[in-house]
Amino acid sequence: MANKRQLKKRISYVCGELAGEIITAYHILNGLDTAAVNKVVCDIAALQTHARRNVTVAFDKAPRDFANRCDYNKARRAYYKAAYSSLRKEFGEKVLAIVKEMNAAIPESERQKIKSL
């Protein structure tokens, strides 16, 4: 990722697409549970807020805490790499959980129609 602003935009894009899919399915498919759709949309909004908030992290050490600047840069890169790897993993897991909720909200009769297409 080039910078935090682009990462935040991509998080918003993914969450917007998920919300758009469930809302479109609600209007197109018959029998979707309104409460389940509302819960999924709220979960998506919470995911977006949480993920965008976690994009901004700060390395809590200063260059004077290390023997030289090279050691500081290595430690800083390792910290940010671990932080963003954790963010990506957590975001991916939560997206999969939301997709499972979205699939569970679709009635079985509608699933059979979709499979037969």
Image: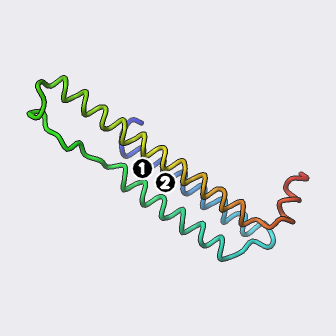
Q: 67 or 31: which is nearer to us?
A: 67
Q: At label 2, which amino acid type do we have?
A: Ser
**Quick one: SS at disc 2?**
helix
> For mark 1, what is the residue?
8
Q: Residue at x 60, y 52 (%)?
A: 96
Most extreme residue toward the right is: 116
Q: Residue at x 66, y 57 (%)?
A: 100
Where, quadrant-wise, is the N terminus in this rendering? top left
Most extreme residue toward the left is: 64
Viewed as shown, does residue 29 lie left or right of 24? right
**Quick one: SS at disc 1?**
helix
Q: Is residue 80 above or below residue 15?
A: above
Q: 114 or 13: which is nearer to us?
A: 114
| Relative image position of residue 70 (x, y in whole percent) | 19, 23
Q: Is residue 68 above or below residue 83?
A: above
| Relative image position of residue 47 (x, y in whole percent) | 49, 59
